[in-house]
Image (cartoon, grey):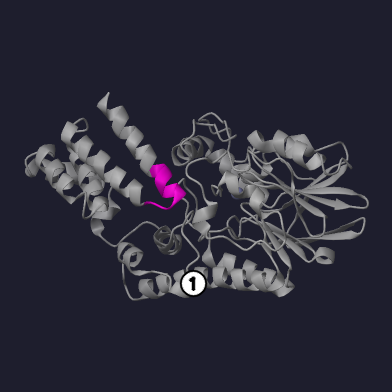
Amino acid sequence: MRPLIAAALALTFATAAAAQPPAQERFGANQPTSAGADQTKALEFAGGRIFQATGFGNTFLVTTKAGNVIVDTSLPTNAARHHALLTAVSSAPIKDIILTHAHGDHTGGVGVWKGPGTHIVEQANSVEFRNYQVRLAGFFAVRNAAQYNAPVGGLGGGRANLNPGNYAAPPLADVLFDKEYKFKLGDLTFDCLSAPGETPDMLNVWIPELKALFIGDNYYASFPNMYTLRGTLTRPALNYVQSIDKVLALKPEIVLPSHGVPIVGAENVQRTLKQYRDAILYVHDATVRGMNQGKDAFTLMKEIKLPKELEVGEGYGAISWSVRGIYEGYAGWFDTDPATMYATAPLEAYAELVRVAGGAGPVAARAEALVASDPALALRLTSAALAAEPKNPAALTARQHALEKLLAASKNSNESGWLHAGLNKVEAARK
Ligand SMILES: [Zn+2]
């Protein structure tokens, strides 16, 4: 998962007492790789034992009397900058690299940190999780590029559209563990705990001496991206809930997410993470209730809203995508309409309807009329019009207007990314 963090804010939160700003202030527009780019000094926490280099994926350095430990390594594009910021704090040898999960914005800098005696620690599900990502490398490369408005491979993935095999990811870890892996280094204990949430291989790191917990991507300043549009299995809501409950029971005084800034103060941690957990549980339970009542996914996407006290922002994940993700995560794709059983795509039927309606022109005109009041419906109509006549100028223009209207209203970076991608396709279709 790859939240977009506003670069300019990175340096503002160096002090322990910093209050949490609203989510929308911490998520920038489409600048995925630039978070923290202007950082000149590592952020310092836990009485000068933990340091953060900020990025699209933070890198953390923990100092001990017997050497240093790195938690997460960011994207390849951030690795050299993070290395410079953190080695300016301490140049002691790196004894261990702990990777909270096997997403590229956490593992991309391993090469710059690993020395001859460095151990890499991961949760055991990282093996299959990495294979899954490599298996679908071509699929993800194109989708990541669209979502993040970047060139294909430009986020550090860089893989060709080939499947090198079903189990082809090269191994990375020296230590793989199932539930827990605890080790002592110098004066600190590193308790690595399996914490499935955003990914099945997520781990949290608890340092009891500092009452510090690294939560990986199981928390960031937005409702979680429980279903990500770039493509994923739905990330099980109840996994997040259980993993966050385990964090709460440890009573940390600081929780360090791999995107954004730490949650500081025992009470603040409890309040923030309880609200986050309860928001996830609310959306899950409301979806399950609706499913048991026989409601369809689209109805529930419209119906389910968080109560005011559980609003955690939707700058990255969105409630409606999570609702559909939970629904289809439990039930799969079949919607009970017998038509859905067959390979005839909805767009094939749309095109027939458009022809019956007199062609793309009249449908485009109706779409244009709907842009102001219901741009999402207008967008659907242009999909239909273009299914019949892919180059119809009026349909392309109506589609552009619908996308622009939705973009102007969007406060979600992933939504904005895909709306931009849609506009790029309109532009390409005009050529
Ligand atoms: Zn991430």
Q: Is residue 160 above or below residue 367?
A: above
**Residue 425 point in image, percent of width and height:** 33, 33
How many residues crowd mark 1 within 10 Å: few (<14), some (14–19), many (20+)? some
Secondary structure beneath label 1: helix
Q: Residue at x 15, y 48 (%)?
A: 369
Give yes or no for residue 120 being in the magenta stretch.
Answer: no
Q: Is residue 125 visible?
A: yes
- Please identify the dominant SS of the magenta region: helix
State the residue in front, 381 or 202.
Answer: 381
Examine the rendered structure and indicate whether residue 107 appears above or below residue 77.
Answer: below
Where residue 430 appears, as percent x and y from the top left, is 25, 27
User: Dividing the image into 4 quarters, which one contains the C terminus?
Assistant: top left
Question: Does residue 225 appear in the picture of this structure?
Answer: no
Q: Is residue 417 magenta?
A: yes
The image position of residue 280, as x and y in percent, is: 51, 68
Query: Label 1, on which residue?
Result: 310
- Which of the 4 image quarters holds residue 248? bottom right
Q: Residue furthest top?
A: 431
- Identify the residue shown where x is 13% and y is 47%: 366
Q: Which residues are magenta?
A: 410-418
Q: Nearer the viewer, residue 81 or 274?
A: 81
Q: Is 47 placed left or right of 105 in the picture?
A: right
Question: Residue at point 60% right, 69% down?
Answer: 272
Image point (41%, 70%), residue name: 287
Q: Along the horizontal axis of the image, is 381 left or right of 319?
A: left
